[in-house]
Amino acid sequence: MAQVGTPDSGASPVVWTGGAGANNNDIVIQTLDSNRFDTFLLKSQQGVMDVFVDLGDGNFIGPMSIADLGATSSDPVIVTVAARLYGFRGSFKAIQVQQNGATAVTGAILRMQRHD
């Protein structure tokens, strides 16, 4: 995983790239402190993922329901599909993205930014 971008008082986006997994429940991406961000976008090239969040006590809870930004309906999902864009909003201490199932996750990207 590589962090790309330089936070500018929370205004500039930070992008986590290169997330990959091999087995079910592998951690694909885990952020450091994400308190200054409130808008998140997620996608992968292959494999499916779940999103877990830490509200500040060091424990990740989830999977969290997220919006499928490519869907024709507004129904939230818990598990992503490869090559689709997903979004969620909130205030979290940290975010953990895990592989769901046996198909390896490749090319996972999580973009974090502040949306005032």
Image: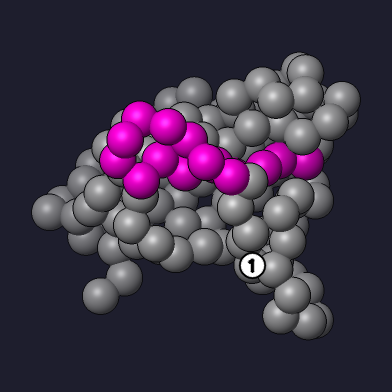
106 vs 54, nearest the viewer:
54
For disc 1, the marked residue is 67
Q: Position of residue 57 (x, y in %)?
A: 31, 35
Amino acid type at circle 1 is: Ala
Residue 116's quadrant in the figure? Answer: bottom left
Of all residues, the one furthest to the bottom in this rendering is: 73
- At 73% from the left and 61% from the top, the residue drawn is 77
**Considering only vertical position in the picture, is 23 above or below 60?**
above
7 with respect to 25 (left or right) = left
Residue 104 in view of the camera: yes
Q: Position of residue 49 (x, y in %)?
A: 71, 40
Crowding at mark 1 (Cα within 10 Å: few <14, some 14-19, many 20+): some
34 vs 65, nearest the viewer:
65
Verify whether residue 49 appears in magenta. yes
**Considering only vertical position in the picture, is 62 above or below 1?**
below
Name the secondary structure under disc 1. strand
Residue interval drawn in magenta: 48-62
